[in-house]
């Protein structure tokens, strides 16, 4: 039987104690997700293939609800801010909540019909991701971006759609500020 | 179609903006949940039937995931700390997460088999409530206890089981500290 638990979340570091899983993505794991492959090569070379983001899970198959944290490092590949791969849920009826704890960023969302929306990520904002909206997080700040996510345990991740076609918009630095621009590589 | 939204949560006051619903429970609404009816009458009389807790919802029928806040006032009825009614979920497969933002309290849980567990509620602790555990929150501090809850939209609330029988344990003040004691009224 699953037992209740007090899971300690550090809103600065994003650590989850206890956690059931952890993974990290380095820049080299994100090839194909940034616009500029040559800039990616340079960023990997210059930074020793740095970690772009980490994910901690608190997930039990016997519970319908899972949660965890995502910790995104600050940085850019060319003019494009560090991003997560982005995904739809395999179960189309599943939404998600991203509750930002520290840092600042942009949640970029795309509906199946191709509509783009953004939600500002900053402490105190709990972003509501409706079912069947693809979503990607982007760290537009100078510090770590840490958020807690909550979703159905069996929501599943479909990374393929966004990997194959990209998203319609990119978030780049322009005049020192984040700007949403068309993705020239969108298939 | 449901649209993404940045829902602003104030961890001090518990306000949720925008919210889809709000309700409050005054002490008179909690008759039958405290051990001592005479003490309840006195507390209602003395405080002008004060609010014991408020709940804000962000809930859409077209999303599987709902969230919101609970704001518990500090106080006691006799020696017993202010509490929520407590509930099981109607859908037994549904768990919940309670992420404390400010204040301090105790989450009191009871399995169907009658096992009691507690989880300390304090900022940074996300309490994991497994499916089919009854749960009640108790404000054991001097300030408001504010937490954000996340659960399936259709989990449903079964308040009856706990209202009819009570929970096996109570949380009372003893020597200035919260103590877990047997409930003499447990049916």
Image (tube, coloured by chain):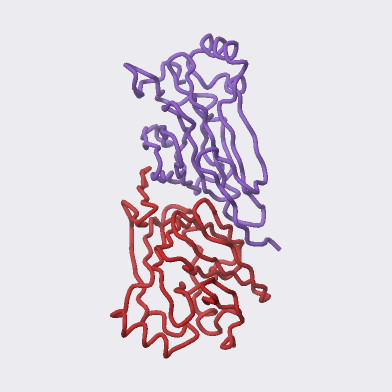
Chain colours: A purple, B red
Instruction: Give the tally of numbered discs.
Output: 0
Q: Is residue B15 above or below residue A104?
A: below
In terms of depth relative to the viewer, which is nearer, B153 or B125? B125
Image position of B139 (left or right of A25) = left
| Percent coordinates x, y for residue A59 in the rendering | 63, 49
State the residue in front, B180 or B111.
B180
Q: Residue at x 53, y 79 (%)?
A: B162
Image quarter in which the C terminus of chain B is found: bottom right
Name the spot of residue B128 as percent of width and height, x first. 58, 57
Q: Residue furthest right?
A: A1
Q: Is residue A106 above or below residue B77?
A: above
Snapshot quadrant of residue B52: bottom left
> How far across and how far down the image is residue A72, in percent?
52, 31
Q: Is residue B94 visible?
A: no
Image position, residue A121 (x, y; %)? 40, 37
Please, which residue is most extreme toward the left here?
A: B48
Q: Residue furthest front?
A: B175
For residue A56, what is the image quadrant?
top right
Report the front residue among A37 and B114.
B114
Q: Going by the image, does A38 lie left or right of B182?
A: left
Residue B137 sits above or below residue A183 on the image: below
Q: Going by the picture, which residue comes out furthest to the bottom?
A: B38
- Can see residue A180? yes
In which quadrant of the rendered view does residue A130 lie?
Answer: top left
**Residue shown at the point (60%, 11%) measured from the top left:** A45
């Amino acid at each position: 039987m699953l037992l209740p638990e007090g899971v300690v979340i550090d809103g600065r570091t994003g650590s989850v104690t206890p956690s059931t899983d952890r993974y990290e993505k380095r820049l080299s794991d994100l090839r194909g997700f940034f616009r500029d492959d040559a800039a990616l090569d340079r960023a990997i070379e210059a930074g020793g293939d740095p970690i772009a983001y980490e994910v901690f899970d608190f997930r039990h198959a016997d519970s319908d609800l899972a949660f965890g944290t995502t910790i995104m490092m600050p940085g850019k590949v060319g003019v494009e801010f560090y991003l997560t791969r982005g995904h739809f849920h395999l179960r189309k009826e599943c939404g998600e909540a991203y509750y930002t704890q520290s840092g600042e960023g942009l949640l970029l969302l795309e509906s199946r019909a191709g509509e783009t929306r953004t939600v500002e990520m900053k402490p105190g904002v709990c972003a509501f991701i409706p079912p069947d909206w693809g979503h990607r997080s982007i760290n537009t700040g100078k510090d770590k971006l840490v958020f807690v996510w909550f979703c159905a345990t069996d929501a599943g991740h479909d990374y393929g759609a966004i990997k194959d076609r990209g998203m319609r918009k990119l978030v780049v630095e322009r005049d020192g500020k984040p700007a949403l621009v068309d993705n020239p590589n969108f298939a």
